[in-house]
Amino acid sequence: MHVRLLCLLALRVFGRLMLLGRGQASARQAHAVAQWITGPWVSPPAPVPRTLFGVTLNSSTGTMPGFRVGAVRLWDSGTRWAEIQPRRGEFDWTVLDRHVAGAREAGLPVLFVLGGTPEWASPGGPPAPYPDGTRASSPDSLADWDAFVRALVKRYRGRIEAYELWVLATDPRFYSGSIENLVEMTRRASRIIRAEDPRATLVCPGMGSLWSREGQDVLRRFAHLGGYGFCDVAGIKLYQRSASDPPESMLALAATVDRVLHEAGIQPRLWSTGTTYSITLERPLDEQKARDYAVRFFLTGLYARKVNLERMYFYNWGGTKIPIVLQAEGGAPTRAALAVEQLQRWLARAESRSCGNGLAINLSENVWQCEFTITGPEHRYTATIRWAVTGTADTTAGPKATMVRRLDGSAEVVRPGDTVTVTEEPILIEDHP
């Protein structure tokens, strides 16, 4: 009798293992973006910060975006070290003055990016990808680095909110030195900035190429050498493997970063400060996809709150040789830019509550959503932003749903239980007060 019972139990366990194996095989066939968040994350309600919605300015005019953004970052904007200090002891602050004044007038916090060593400071260093002799190496004498950082922070104390202490530390076209030297430059810059402007936020050197083992090794080495102990924030570059991949695929990269940093025993705040150098070589997206992807870029940032991410800087504003153009310098905001602005209107008084996707939240496998509490002029109410990562899906309006709003500003009344078809364009579903 005992033998028979044991056999029956063994068969049950074997059957469950077989089902589990089939489920795992099916999961492997699902889109990669569904593999990181298998269930909803829930946190105490937290305001959606305006600064989540950042852009990198690729312009030297000091003009700010013609649509709503929450923060600006300066790179390829006439503000490289080599452009500001063409000779030892001589500084030209003209362009940076314009940027800082423009941002101040628009009420936008500035993230200044250090990088681009002048030729005079490293005559034998390898050239960076700029025609003016800018070097990818660190300066031969770190005293020159100290002098530049000190002059910069003294001039803009209280006017530049944050400093990214190198632009792209994982790419030899932008930094060709040792990680040990980069940690020392970070330590020295941190000491100077904290002495001159204690309220400034220090962002450790930007880490990109993180889809590759080489990029991850640099991140890991910088962490193990204690580099993040000198900063307030870790700068990372979240981007899709290809611009045509869904923005949600960046979450796999965020998970990799989180794992590497946890293995190093740290969990710093994260700002995503850029993309890959090859972005300018990729084909432009069609207008519809560009709009949807631009909005979902920032929604992906909300998902990544799970790994301590606070800001997303879209690359870029002002340029046109990129897959998604928000606004060409001197031109009007594109549909993508206006949709990003609409997303910010939706979330201007919102607190995020949870995000999730697929079967884990009782939706179709391709559906993603984030839930919010919004404080209106007269009452608080709940709302959901929902979209399909690819294709379409029929979903059901919740028990208090009253309105569906779209990125073009249109809206339609719905009733609880109505079928709401979602596409790759995010929609806002509002509930009763």
Image (tube, rainbow, N blue to C red):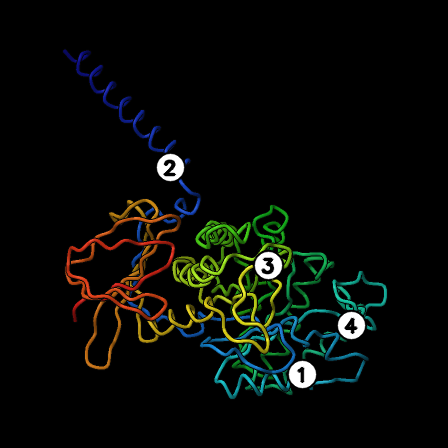
Q: Give the Cα distance between marks 1 and 2.
A: 52 Å
Q: Residues within 10 Å of mark 4 (few under 14, many from 20)?
A: many
Image quadrant where one finds the C terminus? bottom left
Image location of residue 93, percent across then percent down: 69, 85
User: Relative to the observer, which residue lies in front, 152 or 230?
Assistant: 152
What type is the residue that disc 1 sits on?
Val
Q: Identify the disc placed on residue 118.
A: 4
- Nearest-to-viewer mark from 3 and 2: 2
Q: Give the Cα distance between marks 3 and 2.
A: 30 Å
Q: Are marks 3 and 2 in contact (CB under 8 Å)?
A: no
Q: Give the Cα distance between marks 4 and 1.
A: 17 Å
Image location of residue 346, percent across then percent down: 33, 71
Q: Where on the picture, by quarter, is residue 84?
A: bottom right
Q: Which residue, given by chain and number where applicable, does mark 2 sit on?
A: 27
Q: Which residue, given by chain and number where applicable, does mark 1 sit on?
A: 95
User: Relative to the observer, which residue lies in front, 67 or 196?
Assistant: 67
- Give left or right: position of 26 versus 397: right
Image quadrant where one finds the N terminus? top left
Identified at 61% across, 79% down, the residue is 193
- Nearest-to-viewer mark from 4 and 2: 2
Image location of residue 4, percent across then percent down: 18, 12
The mark nearer the N terminus, 4 or 1, is: 1
Q: Secondary structure at mark 3?
A: loop
Q: Which residue, given by chain and number where applicable, does mark 3 sit on?
A: 207
Compared to 165, does 267 lie above or below?
Answer: above
Identified at 35% across, 47% down, the residue is 366
Q: Where on the picture, by quarter, is residue 359?
A: top left
What type is the residue that disc 4 sits on?
Pro
Q: Secondary structure at mark 1?
A: helix
Q: Give the Cα distance between marks 1 and 3.
A: 26 Å
Q: Identify the disc placed on residue 205.
A: none
